[in-house]
Amino acid sequence: MNEECPICWSSLNSPIRASGDKHPIDCPRCGEFVVSGVVSSELYHKPLNGLQIANASGWIRQYRQRGKILLNDVETLRNQRTPTVAEKANKLLLYLSKEFPIPGQSLNFNWNESPLLAVTWSQNVEELSYLFKDYLYGEKVFLIYELDEQGIQKFKISPVGWAYIDSLKQINPESRIAFVAMWFDEKVKPLWSEAIKPSIEAAGYEPLRIDMHQHNNRIDDEIIAMIRRSRFLVAEFTDQRGGVYFKAGFARSLGLEVIWICPRNELKNVHFDTRQYNFITWEDGNLEDLRKALQYRIEATIGRGNYKPQTA
Ligand SMILES: [Zn+2]
């Protein structure tokens, strides 16, 4: 007898072969992830309800494939925001465009495929069918169909659907990383810890500063790779560091959104070519202003993310 997934209770693809306290799960709906004994007993004693299961298996499939679910993730799983109908339908449309990338190709998929429930964060096949037939086909006309020789409907993505998919393909739409380019100096420590880091986290992204790995301001492959994986970049111009200009320019060249911030008394020093950008500025020491302004700017230009900082 196969065991069940501690998240969604589907029968697992293969039995759990625990090594130490690691229990690798291979679930047809949630995908592959690892839980500890404490996490699975927590979930067995207080199982998720139907809506929580839809959100949790969606979250795991989107963000934690082959990763670990820690005890403090369990609260995150219980409290995930439910995506709107439009967001779920977008996930389905993007998925279909990846699975069936050739325009005109029929969308031959099986309604009972468990991964589709997780991909669309849906509770059941009825919801999935609603997203497909009522929303994407009926309302938005992002799908069209024709009848084959046997009179069976063959759906495909419509021209309007492809145009909409293009508009959704921002750079790294699923990334939760906000890369922060700034001077590394004792003087700007509060700027990071009291304004930049908390505002990015409050907007739902993971702030990443490369000096966490001791880099002495060198632009190396790791920095380039990290910027490539980011959702957007925050460039902070205290002391007019060359590295900050370089990273901001590189991010722009990839098409990433850059949020430009600079203390008001240094704004006159920023390079002429960057003056066209809408800088967030603040009076010396007024970090609370910056914290709010940066959070609002991220939410307005990028949209809210769903990253939650790990507390333990
Ligand atoms: Zn599962």
Image (cartoon, rainbow, N blue to C red):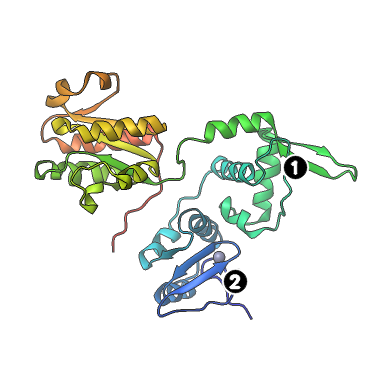
At a point 45% along the width and 37% down the height, the residue shown is 171
At a point 52% along the width and 66% down the height, the residue shown is 7
Quadrant in which the C terminus appears: bottom left
Residue 281 quadrant: top left
Residue 69: x, y in percent?
A: 42, 65
Q: Is mark 2 within 8 Å of ligand 1?
A: yes
At a point 56% along the width and 32% down the height, the residue shown is 166
Residue 187: x, y in percent?
A: 9, 41
Residue 303: x, y in percent?
A: 41, 37
Count of picture labels: 2
Q: Is residue 139 rendered to the left or right of residue 67?
A: right
At a point 68% along the width and 38% down the height, the residue shown is 102
Q: Is residue 236 shown to the viewer in this render? A: no
Residue denoted by label 1: 106
Q: Secondary structure at mark 1?
A: loop
Residue 107 quadrant: top right
Residue 261 quadrant: top left
Vertical order, 89 against 41 (above or below) = above
Please state which amino acid type lies under the numbered disc 1. Ser
Q: Which mark is residue 12?
A: 2
